[in-house]
Image (cartoon, rainbow, N blue to C red):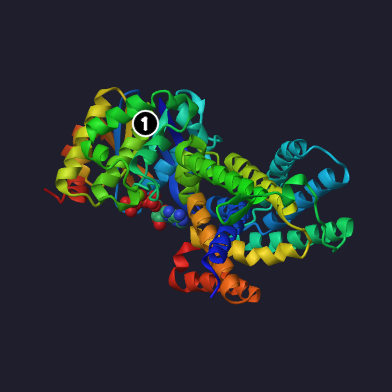
């Protein structure tokens, strides 16, 4: 039996990986819940952003702040362009799954072609810095990730809950015809939502690149666990997503500490199967 | 004010409205009655621009509505209380009412509008945070009416407001319809309860198989033996 300090340290690292799952999954949850689009290419966007950040900061030596400030609007526009394609070709929920899977493969090949399949490591002063909190070590990058995720998730929740645009998006997801009768232009709002979703993906990409070594194959590694969190948290529900992600993150970390690392993926997939059997209405 | 000239509309190959002409003057309450499947909801949906017009002309205050999208109608002062309420069931009562004043021009009067709706239907104030989908049928109808009133319409399209409601709620709903009409709002009222509809209406039309078969002052329609026989149980 591992010591209580070790267990506490794993719970903490579970919280941090859960935060990254939530930040990666937010865009998928929003687009799935409110636009009925299952955008697997979101993972490719996250990694594309990660590589661009790596390239600009580690290779070209740009200032990290500048890179983040540029990446967010760039990916917003990418999200708008993607939604334009979905609308142009009237892509429905099922077709979106296939189309975006294809797009993911294309972007993955593009990343492999530019940056090769090798693992890239980004060295920033932040990446090795941790502070000691009692008996626990807290990596600073992960603490920032947690704070950013909390801020983004709460902002997304407040946006959907308290603004006219957010209410209109939810109304339109429930009843597009009646929402239109009250002035809601779903088409226009879908662009905004898709842009916001992609921008949150870019933010996740920053932490994918800064937090740990990055390689193209990780793209598919995170897909299962993030989708599990998205479905468990409730589609289009940012707070639910955060809770589910952290729950899964902690469950994985504890599984790793108590058994072996190779058992961790089993946690998210058993959870996913469990939900699909017990609560198929959540999808 | 509202003018329909020889409107034809339908679904696929089927014609649901053939050559329908109808008008509503400013401040007038016009009832359209007819059997199930006569085309009443189709008529409402055509005016609300939720269904395309095959031929004919639809104008409101001189503006041709024929090619406008549904989103444009709110700014022209037209609001809809759809058949079967059609609320946003997973949103709260107050959020449903907020959707009524979604248009930029209507937002400034939100608080005033909420106060007015809550005064009309006090139960909604108590239930303001409850999910609309969990309300009783009568309360849902109140929300549907409130949502439309939040848009401050000059023309209200009301499709079967009494459907499935207890008599006391029907009475409450019709009191509100009367009161809003008294404020000068024009209305198109579709109603199964023909006696009740013709009682509050200024004029009435009878729709049969997609065509208007009678049009007259509401009081005169109520007196006509053929109408009484067909829609008022022959009494
Ligand atoms: N979405 C639709 N697709 C195909 N046909 C439809 C559709 N909606 C209505 N119809 C048909 O059009 C005709 C008119 O229907 P409509 O709903 O306008 O009648 P209504 O007078 O409102 O009836 P009710 O009193 O039952 O509400 C009917 O024959 C109906 O079957
Ligand atoms: Mg009808």
For residue B102, side relative to residue A128 (left or right)? left
- Answer above or below: position of B156 versus A195: above
The local secondary structure at tag 1 comes to loop
Mark 1 Cα shell of 10 Å, populated few (<14), some (14-19), many (≥20): many
For residue B36, side relative to residue B172 (left or right)? right
Residue A62, given in percent of the width and then of the height, sits at 83, 38
User: Looking at the image, can residue A118 be seen?
Assistant: yes
Chain letter of mark 1 equals B
Pointer 1 residue Cβ closer than 8 Å to ligand 2: no
Q: Quadrant of the N terminus of chain B?
A: top left
User: Looking at the image, can residue B7 be seen?
Assistant: no
Residue visible at 74% across and 41% down? Answer: A71
Residue visible at 75% across and 51% down? Answer: A50
For residue A158, side relative to residue B226 (left or right)? right
Residue A113, given in percent of the width and then of the height, sits at 88, 59
Q: Nearer the viewer, residue A272 or B97?
A: A272
Residue at the left extreme of this rendering:
B235
Residue A170, given in percent of the width and then of the height, sits at 48, 46
Q: Nearer the viewer, residue A18 or B126?
A: A18
For residue A50, side relative to residue A25 (left or right)? right
How many numbered circles does the render carry? 1
- Answer above or below: position of A203 versus A8: above
Where, by quadrant of the figure, is residue A75 drawn? top right
Q: Nearer the viewer, residue A205 or B91?
A: A205
Residue visible at 64% across and 73% down? Answer: A261
Where, by quadrant of the figure, is residue A182 drawn? top left
- Answer above or below: position of B66 versus A31: above
Residue visible at 70% across and 47% down? Answer: A202
Q: Which residue is mark 1?
A: B150
């Amino acid at each position: 039996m591992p010591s209580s300090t070790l267990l506490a340290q794993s719970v903490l690292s579970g919280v941090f990986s859960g935060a990254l799952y939530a930040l990666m999954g937010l865009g998928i949850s929003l687009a799935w819940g409110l636009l009925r689009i299952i955008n697997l290419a979101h993972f490719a966007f996250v990694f594309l952003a990660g590589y661009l950040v790596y390239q600009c900061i580690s290779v070209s030596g740009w200032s990290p702040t500048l890179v983040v400030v540029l990446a967010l609007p760039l990916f917003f526009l990418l999200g708008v362009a993607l939604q334009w394609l979905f609308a142009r070709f009237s892509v429905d929920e099922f077709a979106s799954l296939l189309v975006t899977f294809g797009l993911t493969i294309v972007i993955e090949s593009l990343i492999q072609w530019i940056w090769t399949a090798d693992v890239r490591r980004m060295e920033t002063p932040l990446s090795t810095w941790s502070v000691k909190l009692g008996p626990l070590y807290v990596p600073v990058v992960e603490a920032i990730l947690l704070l950013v995720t909390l801020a983004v998730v709460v902002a997304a929740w407040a946006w959907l809950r308290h603004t006219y645009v957010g209410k209109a998006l939810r109304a339109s997801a429930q009843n597009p015809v009646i929402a239109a009768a009250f002035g809601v232009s779903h088409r226009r709002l879908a662009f905004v939502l898709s842009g916001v979703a992609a921008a949150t993906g870019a933010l996740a990409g920053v932490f994918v690149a800064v937090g740990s070594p990055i390689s193209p194959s990780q793209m598919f590694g995170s897909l299962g666990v993030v989708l599990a969190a998205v479905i468990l948290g409730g589609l289009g529900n940012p707070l639910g997503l955060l809770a589910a992600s952290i729950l899964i993150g902690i469950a994985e970390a504890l599984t790793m500490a108590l058994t072996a690392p190779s058992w961790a993926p089993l946690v998210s997939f058993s959870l996913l199967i469990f939900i699909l059997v017990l609560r198929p209405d959540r999808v | 004010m509202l003018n329909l000239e020889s409107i034809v509309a339908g679904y696929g190959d089927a014609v649901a409205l053939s050559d329908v002409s109808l008008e509503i003057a400013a401040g007038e309450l016009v009832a359209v009655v007819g059997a199930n499947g006569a085309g009443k909801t189709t008529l409402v949906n055509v005016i609300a621009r939720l269904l395309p017009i095959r031929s004919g002309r639809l104008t409101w205050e001189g503006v041709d509505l024929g090619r406008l999208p549904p989103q444009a109608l709110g700014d022209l002062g037209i609001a809809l209380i759809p058949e079967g309420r059609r609320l946003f069931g997973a949103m709260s009562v107050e959020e449903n009412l907020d959707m009524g004043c979604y248009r930029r021009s209507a937002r400034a009067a939100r608080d005033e509008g909420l106060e007015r709706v809550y005064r009309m239907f006090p139960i909604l104030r108590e239930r303001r945070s409850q999910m609309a989908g969990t309300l009783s049928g009568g309360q849902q109808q109140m929300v549907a009416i409130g949502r439309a009133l939040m848009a401050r319409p000059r023309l209200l399209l009301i499709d079967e407001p009494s459907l499935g409601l207890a008599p006391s709620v029907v009475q409450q709903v019709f009191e509100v319809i009367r009161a809003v009409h008294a404020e000068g709002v024009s209305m198109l009222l579709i109603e199964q309860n023909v006696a009740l509809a013709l009682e509050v209406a200024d004029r009435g039309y009878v729709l049969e198989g997609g065509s208007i078969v009678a049009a007259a002052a509401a009081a005169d329609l109520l007196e006509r033996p053929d109408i009484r026989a067909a829609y008022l149980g022959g009494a």
